[in-house]
Image: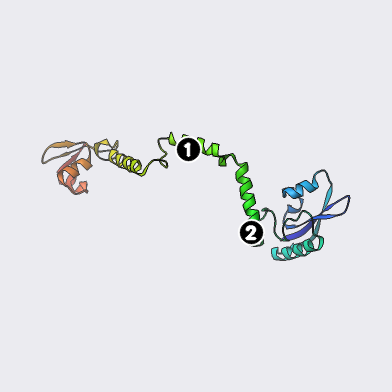
Amino acid sequence: MYYVYEHKFEDTQEVFYIGKGCKNRAYSKYRSKKWKEETRGRQYTVSIIQDNLTEDQAYELEKELVEKHKPVCNIAPGGITNGITSSEHQKEFYKTEEGQVKREKLSKRMKENNPMFSEEKKQIQRERNLGSKNFIHFISPESRERRRVNLSESRKGSQNPRARKCIYVPTKKEYGSITELVRENNLDKNISFYVRRNLVTLL
């Protein structure tokens, strides 16, 4: 169940924030930058206006109270928060023009403050990746294909560390792998057929 609450300054008795939530949300200080600026160095009280509400009921009541008091810290219409919750009402807000502007500003600010997005950091990462033997995103398509073929060939025949040596009985010739035997003698890949008929001896 949800409830609607208010934050009020003790000195002026001004309601500066109206919100909805559940559990201990009303007492949380995980708030917007505006809320933190307004409450810095000031005392305030927390009051539960109405509880035992559904989310829709809480949303409607919050919206009415926000329109009535116009709290300075409510940065969006009632029922919509600063990314604290993920209700359907918040999703609808971000579909509006105002919500899209807010999302773009938030995204830009996060990128500017994140060192991973700096051009210097990107260049360092590119150089590091180019020095890695397992990194192929910056290799040309021709080199990538040549690398794939070489890797594929290295896994075939006797070069494969798991290759099984064998002897083709009719010619008494030894092979470094079953693949080489099958390829040279144009045999079926089902080697067990030849083993059962004593045409191939596995070593």
Type of the residue with mark 2: Tyr
Residue 77 image offset from top left, x and y in percent: 72, 61
Separation of disc 2 and disc 1 at Cα?
35 Å
**Residue 26 placed where, x, y %?**
76, 53
Furthest toward the front, the residue is: 119
**Closer-to-camera residue (29/14):** 14
**Element on which disc 2 rests:** loop
As drawn, is 126 to the left or to the right of 81? left
Q: Residue furthest right?
A: 11
Which quarter of the image is occupied by the N terminus? bottom right
Give residue 126's mark. Answer: 1
**Can you give x and y, in whole percent of width and height, for residue 145 in the image?**
33, 43
Identify the residue shown where x is 54% and y is 39%: 119
Residue located 78% across and 61% down the image:
66
Q: Earlier in the sequence, mark 2 or mark 1?
A: 2
Tell me, yes or no, if residue 173 can be seen here. Answer: yes
Nearest the eye: 165 or 152: 152
Is 108 positioned to the left or the right of 23 in the image? left
Query: Dot 1 surroundings within 10 Å: few (below 14), some, or many (20 or more)?
Result: few
Q: Residue 8 location in percent, x, y?
A: 83, 53
Question: What residue sits right under mark 2 in the picture?
Answer: 94
- Quarter of the rendering occupied by the C terminus: top left
Chosen colour scheme? rainbow
The answer to whether residue 19 is above or below residue 119 is below
Which element carries disc 1, helix, strand or loop?
helix
